[in-house]
Structure formats: C-alpha cells, structure tokens
Image: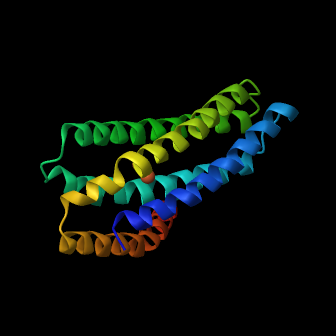
C-alpha cells in the first residue's frame, strides 16, 4: 500500500461524518435549537480523528518528507494551501466550541455562531479532501522511492498506534491536576 492509502481511507470516514453534520445543521435550522451533545461528538471527531490523527499524519510525515524533496512550484503552492486550510479548520473548531459553551450557558444568540462555524466546516472539508485526493496525493508519490514510501507507511502505522495512548494519557494528566 502507498502511504497515501490510509489517508485516502480516512477521507471516506471524514466525509461520512460531514454528511451527518450537514443533516444535523438542517435540523438545527428547522427546529431553532441545538443538541449540545451532538456538537461535542462532532468536535471530538474533528479534533481527534480529522485533525490529530489525519492531519497529523499529513503534516508530520507526508508534508515533512515532501519538504525535503525538490517538488514542483505547483505542488509547493498546493501544500501551503493545505497547511493553511488545516489551520483555518482548527480555528473554526475552536470558535464552534466557544459558541456551544455560550449556548449551554443560556446565551441563545450563540446559535447563529454554532450554525455558521458548522457550515464553514461542512463546506471546507469536502473541498479540502478533493484537492488532496485528486490533485496532490497521487502525483506527490512520484517524488519517493519504493523504500521511502514503505518507511513512510510504517511511520503512519506507528503514529496511529501511539495515538490512543497519547489521548488517554492526556485525559489522565488533565484530571490529576
Ligand atoms: Fe489535509
Ligand atoms: Fe486529508
């Protein structure tokens, strides 16, 4: 398997979650209220799976190794866009959490901020994924030898393996304070 294989597989699960978020947005608009527990679930999915696990492997393994290669101006440009988009996504999630907190505390005006940040994420991910799947991942594999690709893939499995331990160690540390 190529190192972009697991990343493309992860895109499919992210797309499924985005569709659920889209449906949830429609019911928020219809009913004029938010299910804070769903927002928590969506935020956890995006932060842990889409950002830490998925963008983590893109940035810390694939992009890190691409930076060491002489890549075309076009690929360089796309990679910078992708990094910027990851940052924007993180910022949207942060704003979504803040709006949800306000909403839970009784500020009903925060509903529009929940909707706008969820909308941004729902629109952002499919475009970002399409850019990676159709214009970046496969052509970028040509910069690597078979052995470099194998090393990268192994590092990705290791990244995933250690993630679960990292996640729960953080939870324990947070509650020990
Ligand atoms: Fe990405
Ligand atoms: Fe991605």
In the image, 96 versus 98, the foreground residue is: 96
Q: Residue at x 31, y 39 (%)?
A: 78
State which quadrant residue 118 falls in: top right
In the orientation shown, which residue stands out farthest toward the right?
31
Specify whether residue 119 is in view: yes
- Which residue lies at the image location 86% right of the left edge and 33% below the top edge? 30
Residue 130 appears left or right of 105: left
Viewer-proximal residue, 116 or 73?
73
Q: Residue at x 19, y 57 (%)?
A: 143
Question: In the rendered image, is residue 32 in sight?
Answer: no
- Colour mapping: rainbow
17 to 32, vertically: above or below: below
Q: Seen in the image, is 19 located left or right of residue 158?
A: right
Which one is nearer the viewer's eye here, 172 or 61?
Answer: 61
Q: Residue 74, located in which quarter of the rendered image? A: top left
Indicate the position of residue 93 as horizontal and vertical percent values: 54, 41
Query: Looking at the image, which residue sits at the far top?
Result: 109
- Locate residue 133, reporting x and y percent: 43, 52
Left-right relation of 26 to 4: right
Q: Is residue 167 above or below residue 99?
A: below
Residue 137, position as x, y percentages in the image: 35, 54
**47 up-or-down from 167: above or below:** above
Q: Quadrant of the N terminus?
A: bottom left
Count of marks placed on residues: 0
In percent of width and height, residue 82 lies at 36, 41
């Amino acid at each position: 398997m190529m190192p972009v294989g697991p990343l493309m597989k992860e895109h499919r699960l992210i797309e499924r979650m985005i569709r659920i978020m889209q449906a949830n947005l429609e019911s928020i608009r219809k009913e004029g209220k938010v299910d804070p527990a769903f927002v928590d679930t969506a935020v956890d999915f995006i932060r842990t799976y889409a950002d830490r696990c998925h963008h983590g492997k893109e940035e810390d393994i694939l992009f890190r190794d691409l930076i060491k290669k002489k890549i075309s101006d076009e690929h360089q440009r796309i990679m910078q866009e992708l990094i910027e988009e990851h940052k924007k996504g993180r910022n949207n999630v942060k704003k979504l959490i803040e709006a949800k907190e306000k909403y839970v505390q009784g500020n009903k005006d925060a509903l529009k901020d929940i909707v706008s940040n969820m909308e941004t994420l729902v629109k952002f991910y499919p475009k970002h994924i399409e850019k990676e799947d159709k214009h970046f991942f496969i052509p970028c594999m040509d910069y690597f030898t078979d052995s470099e690709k194998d090393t990268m893939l192994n590092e990705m499995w290791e990244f995933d393996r250690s993630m679960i331990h990292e996640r729960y160690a953080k939870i324990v540390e947070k509650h020990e304070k």
